Image (cartoon, grey):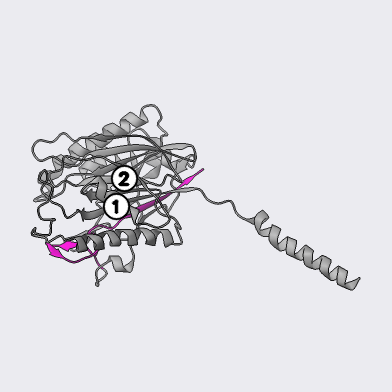
């Protein structure tokens, strides 16, 4: 009898150990992880006669070889695996967008080397003279794609990158991303400002078109804007603000800038200071705690020690003043971890 009782209690205890974790297991959080990153000159080694890519060839001024390209791709994949391994994420980005990619084939090849995710890509060639574009990828295991389109920026003279808009569904919830790589500040910030304002007007037009039918639409605007939060292109033309309550009250005109209250470093280092020229901006629909939404501390400028130079004060670039350094990029990536309600 004593042996029978011991066996009974042993079985009962074992069943409890098996069932309790299942019953008490917290519901898994559903999230969509966004990434924006200017990867700095992701070129193949072939000479494209239709673009100004001569420097990025083995015989060009930068001596861009297959070995250097492979290291560049390894750096990019290393950063993505670092995101996947980070305790705050434990996943690859569901949506990622790279600036300064030369072509669709190279974009696909770079992402194909990742283990554990099979990205699908959306790619539009731009008229940029250097031949650089924005590459967009998504995880088909977590997202369903909708329609996408590329918009040109009307500029006199030198052409620039197109602005991309793409729709997705996450667990049945629709949302859009708008991707930007605005004209640079080369030569003089003031002299080139009108070009970035022209780009901001196009982005604003896309936003207005999406919001006209639904002021609570979930829209994430990402990119290298080559302007900081208080510059006219962002603050006045696009409607960027650090005040979330103002965005909620003025959902048709304002966007929430995720740099608001951020205490970390910027995404780009120039003239001995960190700059915030890469941005993630959100519509009011992303702040309403329904559908897809961004909770507090959803945003981060992501980096780890090896991604910075030895001094730890600036990004570890591939090139610096046309001298090969072999680093990751002259920009740091941005992440946004949105939730699905």
Q: What secondary structure do most residues of the magenta stretch adopt? A: loop
What residue appears at the point 65 percent right and 59 percent down from the top-left corner?
21
Residue 340 rendering spot, x and y as whole percentages? 49, 44
- Image point 13% across, 56% down: which residue? 57
Q: CA distance from mark 2 to mark 1?
A: 13 Å
Q: Taking 341 as reference, is 129 left or right?
A: left
Q: Is residue 63 visible?
A: yes
Q: Which mark is residue 109?
A: 1
The secondary structure type at the circle numbered 2 is strand
* Left or right of residue 177, residue 163 in this image: left
Measuring 21% from the left and 42% from the top, which residue is drawn there?
A: 232
Q: Quick one: SS at disc 1?
A: helix
- Where, by quadrant of the figure, is residue 195 drawn? top left
Count the marks. Answer: 2
Quickly name the residue at label 2.
136
Q: Which one is earlier in the sequence, the residue at label 2 or at label 1?
A: 1
Question: Quick one: 38 or 194, which is closer to the camera?
Answer: 38
Label 2 vs label 1, nearer the camera: 1
Whether residue 30 appears in magenta in the rendering, the answer is no
Q: Is residue 322 magenta?
A: yes
Where 116 falls versus 135 (above or below)? below
Quarter of the figure that contains the N terminus: bottom right
Left or right of residue 39: residue 131: left
Magenta highlight range:
313-341
Query: Can you give x and y, in whole percent of width and height, for residue 121 in the image?
Result: 33, 44
């Amino acid at each position: 009898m004593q042996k029978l009782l011991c066996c009974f209690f042993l079985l009962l205890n074992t069943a409890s150990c098996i069932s309790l974790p299942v019953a008490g297991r917290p519901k898994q959080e559903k999230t969509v992880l966004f990434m924006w990153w200017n990867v700095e000159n992701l070129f193949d080694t072939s000479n494209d006669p239709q673009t100004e890519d001569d420097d990025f060839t083995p015989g060009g001024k930068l001596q861009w070889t297959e070995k250097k390209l492979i290291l560049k791709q390894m750096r990019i994949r290393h950063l993505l695996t670092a995101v996947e391994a980070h305790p705050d994420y434990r996943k690859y980005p569901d949506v990622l967008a790279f600036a300064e990619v030369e072509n669709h084939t190279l974009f696909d090849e770079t992402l194909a080397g990742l283990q554990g995710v099979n990205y699908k890509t959306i790619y539009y060639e731009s008229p940029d003279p250097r031949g650089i574009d924005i590459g967009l990828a998504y995880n088909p295991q977590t997202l369903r794609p909708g329609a996408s389109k590329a918009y040109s920026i009307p500029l006199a003279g030198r052409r620039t990158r197109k602005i991309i808009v793409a729709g997705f569904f996450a667990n049945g919830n629709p949302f859009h991303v708008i991707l930007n790589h605005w004209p640079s500040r080369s030569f003089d910030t003031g002299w080139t400002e009108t070009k970035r304002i022209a780009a901001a007007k196009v982005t604003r037009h896309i936003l207005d078109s999406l919001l006209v039918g639904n002021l609570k639409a979930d829209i994430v605007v990402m990119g290298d804007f080559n302007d900081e939060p208080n510059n006219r292109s962002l603050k006045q033309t696009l409607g960027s603000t650090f005040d979330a309550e103002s965005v909620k009250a003025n959902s048709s005109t304002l966007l929430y800038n995720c740099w608001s209250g951020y205490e970390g470093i910027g995404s780009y280092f120039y003239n001995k200071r960190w700059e915030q020229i890469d941005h993630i901006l959100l519509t009011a629909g992303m702040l309403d705690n329904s559908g897809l939404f961004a909770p507090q501390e959803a945003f981060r400028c992501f980096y780890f020690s090896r991604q910075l130079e030895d001094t730890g004060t600036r990004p570890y670039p591939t090139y610096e003043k046309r001298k090969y350094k072999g680093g990751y990029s002259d920009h740091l990536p941005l992440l946004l971890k949105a939730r699905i309600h």
